[in-house]
Image (tube, helix red, strand yellow):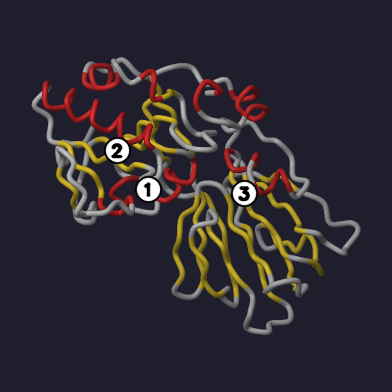
């Protein structure tokens, strides 16, 4: 752990009662260890809410740990912040879908003690980076290039400079291995083991019959070009951020992985089938 980091940041799902009760328990435990802890205001919490913890922006901070209490949506919002991506991440499930989460709110009694005494396994998950023009954005699940509404778009997909297909359809999904079980899967993409670093390309309702999902080497560079631009094409990152599509879009492996501190073993295939939170983790 870098000597420049300090303290612990917490992101929560503000709509979850479980998340709030877990937060109060963790604050008490951190105080016992004399550890600085704060609730990130980027969690969309009401800063006027009376809680026994500081509510401050994470921007400009350098937490050693980030604890995410919620579901996958809460995690995806948290990792949009570089400060979170530089820290070790601990996940506590208290949302609707907890694919990335290893413990429940019922299992937090020893959480602080375990992370302070090194009783965890570090798991790395690789993000992908989207680049083009002035664009530089990271994503953990998927990037989607799509038209507006029900309009089809025409685009080409190239891998390391070689065009693999031209698509006419709703668009294309570029997913990470861990994100292969999200939107890509619902669009007919494959299930890829999250420990198998790779890039998954899934056409979205393509009218090009030969265009099928492709799993490529993680060190490949995928290029997407809009062939007939109408100005209404959208680029959506992890379902969280929507921006215009650059003339040429490149996707590659990010330089550094996310570091998760796992407090218990995660059973990947059970997680894919169950997909919920609570006792389903």
Mark 3 vs mark 2: give the one in front: 2
Specify the label residue 175 is tagged with: 3
Q: Give percent across and percent down for residue 218.
A: 59, 44
Does the residue at mark 3 contact the one at mark 2 (Cβ under 8 Å)?
no
- Residue 228, compared with residue 196, is above or below; it is below
Bin the neighbour count of mark 1 within 10 Å (Cα to Cα): few under 14, some 14-19, many 20 and up: many
Does the residue at mark 2 contact the one at mark 1 (Cβ under 8 Å)?
yes
Specify the label residue 66 is tagged with: 2
User: Tag 2, which secondary structure?
Assistant: strand
Q: CA distance from mark 1 to mark 3?
A: 19 Å
Q: CA distance from mark 2 to mark 1?
A: 9 Å
| Lower position in the chain sequence, tag 2 or tag 1 | 2
Which residue is at a point 24% across and 26% down the rendered structure image?
25
| Lower position in the chain sequence, tag 3 or tag 2 | 2
- Marks counted in the figure total 3
Specify the label residue 78 is tagged with: 1
Does the residue at mark 1 contact the one at mark 3 (Cβ under 8 Å)?
no
Q: Say which of 227 and 23 sits in front.
A: 23
Which residue is at a point 25% across and 52% down the rendered structure image?
41
Q: Quadrant of residue 229?
A: bottom right
- Residue 55, compared with residue 97, is above or below; it is below
Q: Quadrant of residue 109?
A: top left
- Residue 29, compared with residue 48, is above or below; it is above
- 212 horizontally vs 162: left or right: right
Which residue is at a point 38% across and 32% down the rendered structure image?
18
Q: Give percent across and percent down for residue 12.
A: 34, 42
Bin the neighbour count of mark 3 within 10 Å (Cα to Cα): few under 14, some 14-19, many 20 and up: many
Q: Give percent across and percent down for residue 266.
A: 52, 21
Bin the neighbour count of mark 2 within 10 Å (Cα to Cα): few under 14, some 14-19, many 20 and up: many
- 101 horizontally vs 39: left or right: right
């Amino acid at each position: 752990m870098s000597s420049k980091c300090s303290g612990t940041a917490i992101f929560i799902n503000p709509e979850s009662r479980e998340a709030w009760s877990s937060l109060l328990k963790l604050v008490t435990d951190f105080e016992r260890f004399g550890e600085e802890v704060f609730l990130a205001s980027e969690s969309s919490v009401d800063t006027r809410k009376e809680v026994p913890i500081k509510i401050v922006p994470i921007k400009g901070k350098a937490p050693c740990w980030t604890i995410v209490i919620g579901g996958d949506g809460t995690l995806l919002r948290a990792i949009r912040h570089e400060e979170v991506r530089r820290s070790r991440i601990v996940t506590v499930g208290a949302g609707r879908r907890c694919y990335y989460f290893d413990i429940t709110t019922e299992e937090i009694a020893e959480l602080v003690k375990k992370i302070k005494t090194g009783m965890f396994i570090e798991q790395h998950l690789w993000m992908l980076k989207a680049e083009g023009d002035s664009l530089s954005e990271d994503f953990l699940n998927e990037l989607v290039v799509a038209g507006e509404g029900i309009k089809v778009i025409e685009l080409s997909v190239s891998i390391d400079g070689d065009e693999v297909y031209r698509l006419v359809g709703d668009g294309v999904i570029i997913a990470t291995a861990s994100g292969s079980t999200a939107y890509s899967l619902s669009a007919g993409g494959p299930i890829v083991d999250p420990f198998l670093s790779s890039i998954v390309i899934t056409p979205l309702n393509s009218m090009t019959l030969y265009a099928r999902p492709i799993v490529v080497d993680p060190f490949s560079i995928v290029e997407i070009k809009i062939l007939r631009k109408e100005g209404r094409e959208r680029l959506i990152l992890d379902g969280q951020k929507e921006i215009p599509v650059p003339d040429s879009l490149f996707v590659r492996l990010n330089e550094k992985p996310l570091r998760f501190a796992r407090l218990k073993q995660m059973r990947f295939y059970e997680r894919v089938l169950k997909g919920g939170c609570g006792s389903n983790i």
